[in-house]
Image (cartoon, helix red, strand yellow):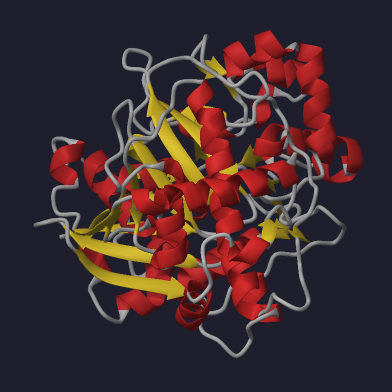
Amino acid sequence: MYFLGYDIGTSSVKLSVISATDGQQVLSVTYPEQEQLIDSPQAGWAEQSPEMWWDSLTAATKIAGKKIDLKAVNGIGITYQMHGLVLVNKQQQVLRPSIIWCDSRAVEIGNTAFENIGAEKCLSHCLNSPGNFTASKLKWVMENEPAVYEQVHKMMLPGDYIAMKLSGEITTTPTGLSEGILWDFKSNDVAEIVLEQYGISPSLIPDIVPTFGEQVRVNSTMAEELGLREGVPVCYRSGDQPNNALSLNVMKPGGIAATAGTSGVVYGVSDQLKYDPKSRVNTFAHVNHSESARRLGVLLCINGTGILNNWMRQNVAKDLSYPEMNELASSVAIGAEGLSILPFGNGAERVLENANPGASIHGLDFNRHGKGQLLRAAQEGIVFSFYYGMEVMQEIGIDPKVIRAGKANMFLSPIFRDTLAGVSGAPIELYATDGSRGAAMGAAYGHGHFASFDEAFASTEKLGLIEPNTAMSAQYQEAYQRWKALLK
């Protein structure tokens, strides 16, 4: 017996299958091998085709089906890129490309709503500014594409779309609605104050199902197409960052999870209704949040993370692999010999109050600096943006003592890991897990196969521990303070 997890990412769709016997991963497939395209019809816009996600999922599933019997799958979990907007008509046809997480077009719409609702009322009920989240993107469609908006039957998040394709049913979760600024934590229901502010009909919100437990079932058409068993339930659904915390068993107050893919996130779990008055970090319902046991995920997001490292490879170090880039950067001392890079070149940054300053290089000396300094400064700049946000998190009581992360993406880089541990003073624990495995484990828990999260994640292998190098802390802090002065 197996459990299947899908991770609907920006760059690819990843699939994991775990054994029900011991929770070990038996299969992993990523499709496509090259990164999926992000369309940017105008500056600050970012769109992807939901049909592209589905095609990638179908291809990955068929690859998996050649290696194992997918009819032995007893439950499915879905994780997905957060904050995206998917619109369908009554025939469940997609009406326009998805406006994804790093799209900045709705910033002013969200800021205006924040002022009209009132900061205190909005933050205490919704715990965030509407900013550039899903609800504001829907309002943008209403104002700018009325012919499209008139056809909308339901609005969804990317994971809701995948569940719809599997089952033919349109549903969402409280966790998903909270990431779209559509969940009121005081009433524990859909955020009417946001719907009223934007003039959005409550009928556009899908039926609400729990984060864990049977949500929908795979219908006969999709079972035949994908090689699954008809009627297998989708037992878990969550955005990628709450799911990353789940995959690392960060479920209790005080826990910290991090990830550093295209974008980067530090995610802390709290049981307190605290919020940043400037909404630079955001609070969502964690996967195990309930009215009786409050579990909130405080999320710091940096859009310009792995995408900057990839840009460096494409434009500065075409002749090098990522390990070779890391090796070259390691030959340069902490601080990159006075070179600093601000990594904010991938849309509006919440930690900068939704400003979109672009990325920039500072202190470049044509006689001293070369490829190695640029590569080191890029990784340090990403880490320093993380720590800048972590200082904001400390203001509302989230103070990382230990950071857990999967050994993937930027966490494969020794420079990245050492710099983060060095500047924050927090040890980093690395685990053999990723989003799709977390989704599969979530499905197993939602199916009732595991009695507790601790039991579900007992098999997760710890790969390493990075302790802060206290002898170098002054050098890390000096480089950070120089970077921070440039930001201000």
Near-viewer residue (79 or 251): 251
Q: State the image coordinates of residue 339 (x, y, percent, origin top left).
A: 68, 63
Residue 196 seen in render: yes
Q: State the image coordinates of residue 473 (x, y, percent, origin top left).
A: 43, 48
Location of residue 452 with respect to 428 vertically, above or below: above
Near-viewer residue (2 or 464): 464
- Most extreme residue toward the bottom is 319
Q: State the image coordinates of residue 64 (x, y, percent, origin top left).
A: 33, 75
Left-right relation of 107 to 311: right
- The quarter holding residue 30 reads bottom left
In percent of the image, x 66 and y 48: which residue is there? 482
Location of residue 85 with respect to 317 vertically, above or below: above
Location of residue 321 with respect to 14 vertically, above or below: below
Left-right relation of 111 to 442: right
Near-viewer residue (274 or 62): 274
Location of residue 405 with respect to 132 vertically, above or below: below
In percent of the image, x 67 and y 9: which residue is there? 120
In percent of the image, x 42 and y 15: which residue is there? 272
- The quarter holding residue 378 reads bottom right
Give the quarter of the figure containing the N terminus.
Answer: bottom left
